[in-house]
């Protein structure tokens, strides 16, 4: 089954969030200031980026559907 | 990491793997709801709870002492002499041993905890990118408020003859005009320059 553009974006978002969660899980098991910085920097960045990519995918999908129904 | 947070991350990870392997599940309504939960709800929750867990972990004694520069301060908690304030507090469980540093080195004012945490970030920056001082000093004199948080109202404190030496002594202590730690009374603190010459208590963990 061919994947649609929105599904590709969802896949990218899922990968980003998964990386963020892995960083979070690892850093929570290391008791050191650097692990907090890695979480606050990289972990939050990946999680945030994944959520944003997902929301943008929803927006884009909404615009495409609206464009098709308008035409 | 707590069981609840671990479970949250695990459930989110399972949903994410499903969405990576089969993004076409989002073609129907149920799949879209799953995507919403897996890509927004659970990650947001994991982020918030994870951040809180990190902040709580940063209060632990083990966390503070994980930097090499803090080694002598950790040692000072084991000094075998009850005149040393931090050592006697930790060894006699007057403060929680797991949060010994944070208990005394935060302020009990409204933004105390947040200020202490932000200060900690500055310490990390200096430790890795700045010049470490030979002697680590407090940013401002230790406020009696931190001592009085526990000792105020305690019989041993209120009834102590030295605290009632004059009519104004107690009032001066409570108003932070006479320092608990710098008036010649309880001024043996970490003493890191001499800690290697002192006897250490072998007990505790």
Image: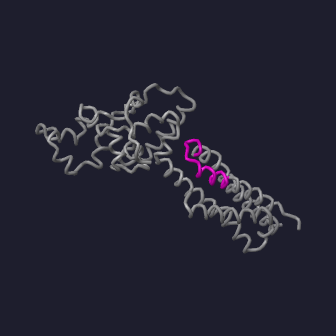
Relative horizontal placement of residue A28, taking residue B179 as reference (left or right)? right
Q: Any magenta on residue B129?
A: no
Most extreme residue toward the left, as rendered?
A: B167
Q: Quick check: B76 above or below B38?
A: above
Quarter-of-image position of residue A16: bottom right
Residue at (21% x, 46% y) in the render: B157
Q: Identify which residue, B8 or B160, lies in the foreground.
A: B160
Q: Is residue A45 above or below residue A54?
A: above
**Of B156 and A24, the residue lying toward us:** B156
Q: In the image, what residue occupies the spot 65% across and 51% down?
A: A23
Task: Describe residue A54's horizontal placement relative to residue A33 as left or right.
Answer: right
Query: Which residue range is magenta in the image?
Result: A20-35
Number of marks present in the image shown: 0
Q: Quadrant of the N terminus of chain B?
A: bottom right
Which residue is located at x 84 percent, y 66 percent?
A71
Is A24 covered by the magenta stretch? yes
Q: How is the image coloured?
A: one colour
Magenta span: predominant SS is helix
Q: Name the residue at 28% across, 40% down.
A: B144
The spot of residue B186 in percent (x, y) is 27, 36
Q: How far across and down, in percent of the image, does residue B68 sit?
A: 52, 35
What is the residue that sits farthest to the right in this orientation? A1
Q: Give how far across and how far down residue B104 sits, in percent.
A: 37, 43
């Amino acid at each position: 089954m061919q994947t649609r553009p929105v599904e590709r974006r969802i896949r990218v978002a899922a990968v980003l969030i998964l990386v963020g969660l892995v960083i979070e899980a690892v850093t929570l098991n290391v008791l050191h200031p650097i692990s907090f910085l890695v979480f606050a920097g990289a972990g939050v960045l990946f999680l945030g980026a994944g959520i944003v990519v997902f929301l943008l995918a929803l927006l884009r999908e909404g615009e495409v559907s609206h464009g098709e129904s308008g035409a | 990491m707590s069981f609840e947070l671990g479970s949250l991350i695990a459930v989110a990870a399972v949903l994410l793997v499903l969405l990576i392997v089969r993004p076409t599940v989002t073609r129907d309504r149920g799949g879209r709801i799953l995507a919403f939960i897996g890509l927004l709800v659970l990650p947001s929750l994991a982020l918030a709870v994870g951040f809180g867990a990190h902040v709580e972990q940063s209060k632990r004694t083990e966390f503070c002492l994980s930097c090499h520069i803090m080694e002598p301060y950790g040692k000072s908690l084991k000094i075998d002499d009850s005149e040393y304030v931090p050592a006697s507090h930790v060894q006699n469980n007057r403060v929680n041993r797991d949060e010994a540093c944070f208990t005394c080195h935060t302020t009990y004012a409204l933004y105390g905890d947040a200020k202490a945490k932000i200060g900690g970030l500055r310490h990390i920056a200096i430790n890795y990118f700045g010049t470490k001082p030979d002697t680590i000093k407090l940013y401002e004199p230790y406020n009696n408020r931190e001592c009085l948080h526990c000792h105020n109202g305690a019989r041993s404190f209120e009834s102590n003859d030295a605290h009632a030496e004059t009519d104004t002594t107690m009032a001066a202590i409570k108003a932070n005009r006479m320092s608990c730690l710098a008036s010649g009374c309880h001024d043996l603190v970490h003493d890191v320059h001499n800690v290697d010459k002192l006897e250490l208590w072998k007990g505790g963990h």
